Amino acid sequence: MNKRLNVAIAGLGSRGKDTYAAAARLFPDKMKIVAIADTNPEKVRETAKEYQVPEEGCFDSAEEMLAKEKLADVMFIATQDRQHVKHAIPALQKGYHLLLEKPISPDLGECRELIRTAKECNRQVVICHVLRYAPFYAKLKELIDADTIGEIVSVMAIENVGWWHQAHSFVRGNWRNSDITSPMILQKCCHDMDILLWLTEKTCKSVSSFGDNYLFRKERAPKGAAKRCLEGCRAKADCPFDAEKIYMDHRKYGVRHGNCEWPLDVLTLHPGEESVKKALLTGPYGRCVYDCDNNVVDHQVVNLNMTDGSTISLTMCGFTSEISRYTKFMGTKGEIIADMGANTIEITRFGTEKIIVDVDGLAEDLKRHGGGDYRLVEDFLDMILEGRGPDGRTTSVECSMESHYCALAAEESRLKGGAVIEIASMR
């Protein structure tokens, strides 16, 4: 194997273009982008120019790229959820090792087909559960493994999706409808399922779940609401989900406050006031949140009964002010409160004073999933360069499946009114 890997990237969305391709600037001695594919020709042209990808390495779709002979050592697959396995199978058969965006697929049959093919082709497939690589969770893992609070008996976790993020991604955006993508509990929270199983080193026995789309429905539209926020909406003043307030005026994310990155770069390739306004007038992100084709939940609770008798509860909710994760671990010797939003970990052993770990001091770079994104990419590159298999932190397909079992069981339970679903039936 060469000292630097040639990389092909399928899908140049927010993950493929702005995260995985950008890793080439951080690790130029470990990776070189030689092929890219996306259905947006402008994205292909600009990415090719930025990373010096030759014209013969530029494709209008992942399918067109995969029709060619093997072009690189590895492929990063960051296409849409239901395309992942359809692109991964031929990539494996051509000899690529894969870094595959989560979720693997909402179809368990496809997941099993991917596992079989990876074994038959003797190729490595790593799923992008990036939270395992965040210094925040690495510290948590260290504390739990050191028996700091004894045996974990119960865990309470909250995924704070964020009010505007819910509207952006799961009402107006790409993951709004499970018929064309994935159930929200899989797409958003296979991260959470994976990190909770990894931290506690537990296995789930059964799941029950409740949730629904409480607010973002046509019948909940306020009086005077228009189909588009910029087209004379009379309910605009009192609506926090107004697209102009989010994408143009928000103090952190709005274009009028100087932001030109995520989420605006999802709306338009070159965010500016005029281009963002045009996107809101013509594209999906300017639609009224009460008049979209969404069907995924805006809140869900999941109860996990573990094989050792312990329990884990997870609440996912779109009606939160912050985008963050909060977890309380309750053990036989104490408790840990892990607040990713505040970047603090509070440790209280029974009968002793509280100790607070400031995660900000653990690493210089905590951007992009708490610093996990680029650490995962580098570990994947090192794994292939060194010819080794996954370690205890790496999420192989088989490892990632545990989180998918839990998430898909939760969705089945939700649709069946909270019925208890045995994980063994999915395995």
Image (cartoon, rainbow, N blue to C red):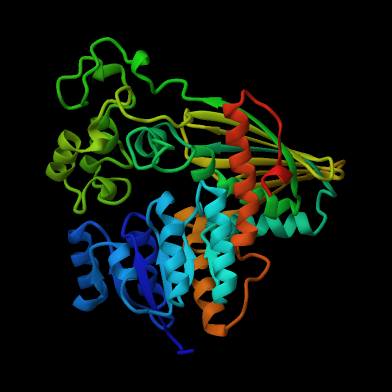
Query: Is residue 128 visible to us here?
Result: yes
Q: Residue at x 63, y 51 (%)?
A: 195
Between 130 and 273, the one nearer to me in the picture:
130
Q: Residue at x 45, y 32 (%)?
A: 296
How many marks are shown on the rendered structure? 0
Q: Residue at x 38, y 34 (%)?
A: 164
Q: Position of residue 221 (x, y in %)?
A: 32, 15
Q: Position of residue 199 (x, y in %)?
A: 70, 53
Left or right of 307 in this view: 102? left
Q: Position of residue 53 (x, y in %)?
A: 25, 76
The image quarter in which residue 304 lies: top right
Between 64 and 199, the one nearer to me in the picture:
64
The image quarter in which residue 422 lies: top right
Residue at far bottom of view: 2
Q: Residue at x 49, y 89 (%)?
A: 1
The image quarter in which residue 63 lies: bottom left
Query: Is residue 123 visible to us here?
Result: no
Q: Position of residue 66 (x, y in %)?
A: 34, 69
Left or right of 13 in this view: 99? right
Between 285 and 111, the one nearer to me in the picture:
111
Answer above or below: position of 223 versus 201.
above
Answer above or below: position of 346 versus 211.
below
Answer above or below: position of 346 versus 246.
below
